[in-house]
Image (spheres, rainbow, N blue to C red):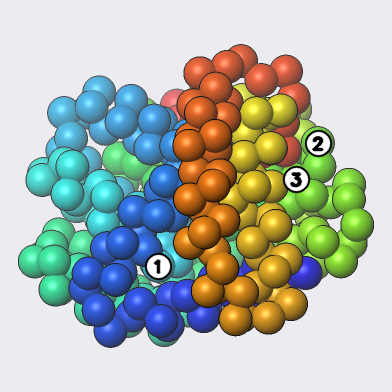
């Protein structure tokens, strides 16, 4: 099953409307548990820096995290890169509509051959590394453009069934990835090889979060892959599962997961 085509279609549907894009971003932050963990890590890192930071959004996608950051921390400045020009064009157009484009620059850039120079106080990489085979090369680029003491925040699937790789292949998202996910020791070792020191490597999408993911993401994606007309039924489905899913996400974020299908990683350049 493919996730990106469905995601891209939603992106195109909201692209010409500021208010639809806003709603779309808010829904991504509400339903995707990864956004809960990433925003918590960002709050910790950026509040410690007084909100005045130069940030590399490494694989910005739709730009939802760039949008969230510059609204919350007016002194933050972001360089958002991606390999997809249509994503960058839509993100730039939206931030211009929001009156925030003066604090975000955009560029087509390949993380394996990163042209950005920095130095940056923080690098954000959300659900990117599972798509890149040359991961140590990317981490070396991160180290190169980080100032000493600078922070890297990475969200990625784990090797404990990330993207549902343990399940039916037709119902997993693993076909779009170059690896099932990272082990804790593996990602620590690769970061160390690149000259970065991991401060936090924690499982996300534990028992509570995995159930919420099935309710709010996996099953709707299965239906949308079967027929996009199922989008007409989704409001009724989400009205049913929204509150339980929010409770499950809250439990995941507040729990110390012994295992989980995702990882949240915070590292720094010594």
Q: Residues within 10 Å of mark 3 (few under 14, many from 20)?
A: many
As measured in the structure, the alpha-carbon distance from the residue carrying label 2 to the one carrying label 3 is: 6 Å
Q: Nearer the viewer, residue 238 or 180?
A: 238
Residue 142 visible in the displayed image:
no
Q: Which mark is residue 62?
A: 1
Q: Quadrant of residue 147?
A: top left
* Left or right: residue 224 compared with residue 250: right
Sequence-first disc among 1 and 3: 1
* Residue 259 picture location, percent across and down: 74, 25
Q: Residues within 10 Å of mark 1 (few under 14, many from 20)?
A: many
Circle 3 sits on which residue?
Answer: 162
* Left or right: residue 234 compared with residue 134: left
Give the residue drawn at x 62%, y 34%. 209
Q: Secondary structure at mark 1?
A: loop
Circle 2 sits on which residue?
Answer: 160
* Residue 80 picture location, percent across and down: 34, 63
């Amino acid at each position: 099953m493919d996730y990106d085509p469905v995601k891209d279609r939603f992106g195109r549907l909201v692209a010409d409307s500021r208010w639809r894009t806003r709603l779309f971003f808010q829904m991504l932050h509400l339903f995707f548990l990864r956004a809960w963990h990433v925003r918590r890590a960002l709050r910790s890192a950026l509040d410690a820096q007084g909100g005045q930071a130069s940030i590399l959004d490494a694989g910005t996608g739709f730009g939802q995290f760039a949008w969230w950051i510059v609204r919350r921390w007016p002194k933050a400045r972001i360089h958002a890169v991606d390999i997809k020009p249509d994503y960058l064009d839509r993100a730039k157009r939206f931030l211009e509509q929001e009156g925030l484009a003066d604090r975000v620059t955009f560029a087509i850039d390949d993380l394996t051959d990163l042209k950005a120079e920095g130095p940056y106080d923080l690098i954000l990489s959300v659900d990117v590394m599972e798509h890149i085979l040359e991961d140590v090369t990317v981490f070396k680029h991160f180290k190169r453009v980080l100032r000493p003491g600078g922070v890297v925040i990475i969200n990625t699937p784990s090797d404990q069934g990330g993207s549902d790789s343990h399940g039916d292949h037709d119902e997993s998202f693993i076909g779009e990835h170059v690896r099932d996910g990272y082990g804790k020791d593996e990602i620590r070792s690769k970061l160390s090889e690149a000259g970065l020191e991991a401060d936090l490597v924690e499982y996300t999408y534990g028992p509570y979060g995995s159930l919420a993911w099935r309710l709010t993401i996996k099953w709707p994606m299965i239906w949308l892959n079967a027929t996009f007309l199922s989008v007409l039924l989704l409001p009724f489905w989400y009205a049913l599962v929204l509150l339980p899913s929010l409770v499950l996400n809250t439990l995941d974020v507040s729990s110390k997961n012994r295992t989980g299908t995702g990882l949240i990683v915070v590292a720094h350049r010594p």
